[in-house]
């Protein structure tokens, strides 16, 4: 990843649109209830959806962590 990627990501993370999107993702994580599922197929579908939602919810932290690692590597 290059500096432009990290700069663009930081610019995106400070927007109101990003905050709104992440709030919606977090609400979807909370509202995904396994007790309401009809069968095994619905369970596996929900499990996949939940995995994707968690990945999206953690994207900002992942990018910041990757940037820190890259900075540490370039300092060495």
Image (spheres, grey):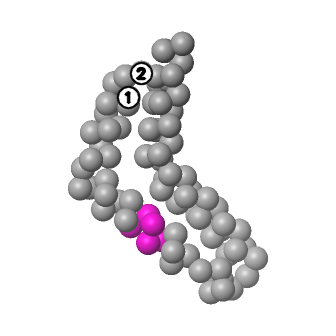
9 in the magenta segment: no
Q: In the image, is residue 31 above or below residue 70?
A: below
Q: Outermost residue toward the right? A: 40
Q: Which residue is mark 2?
A: 2
Q: In the image, is residue 57 above or below residue 59?
A: below
- Count of numbered badges drawn on the protein: 2
Q: In the image, is residue 61 above or below residue 20?
A: above
Query: Quarter of the image containing the C terminus?
Result: top right
Give coordinates of residue 57: x percent, y percent: 48, 56
Q: Which residue is mark 1?
A: 5
Name the secondary structure under disc 2. loop
Identify the magenta region: 24-28
Q: Is residue 67 shown left or right of residue 37? A: left
Give coordinates of residue 61: x percent, y percent: 47, 46
Q: Quadrant of residue 22?
A: bottom left
Are the two marked residues, 2 and 1, in contact with CB atoms closer than 8 angstroms? yes
Q: Outermost residue toward the front? A: 76
Q: Nearer the viewer, residue 28 or 44?
A: 28
Give coordinates of residue 5: x percent, y percent: 38, 29
């Amino acid at each position: 990843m290059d500096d432009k990627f990290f700069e663009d990501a930081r610019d995106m993370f400070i927007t109101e649109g990003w905050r709104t999107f992440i709030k919606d993702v977090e609400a979807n994580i909370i509202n995904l209830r396994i007790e309401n599922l009809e069968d095994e197929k619905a369970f596996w579908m929900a499990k996949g959806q939940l995995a994707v939602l968690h990945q999206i919810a953690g994207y900002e932290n992942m990018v910041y962590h990757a940037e820190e690692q890259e900075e540490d590597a370039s300092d060495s």
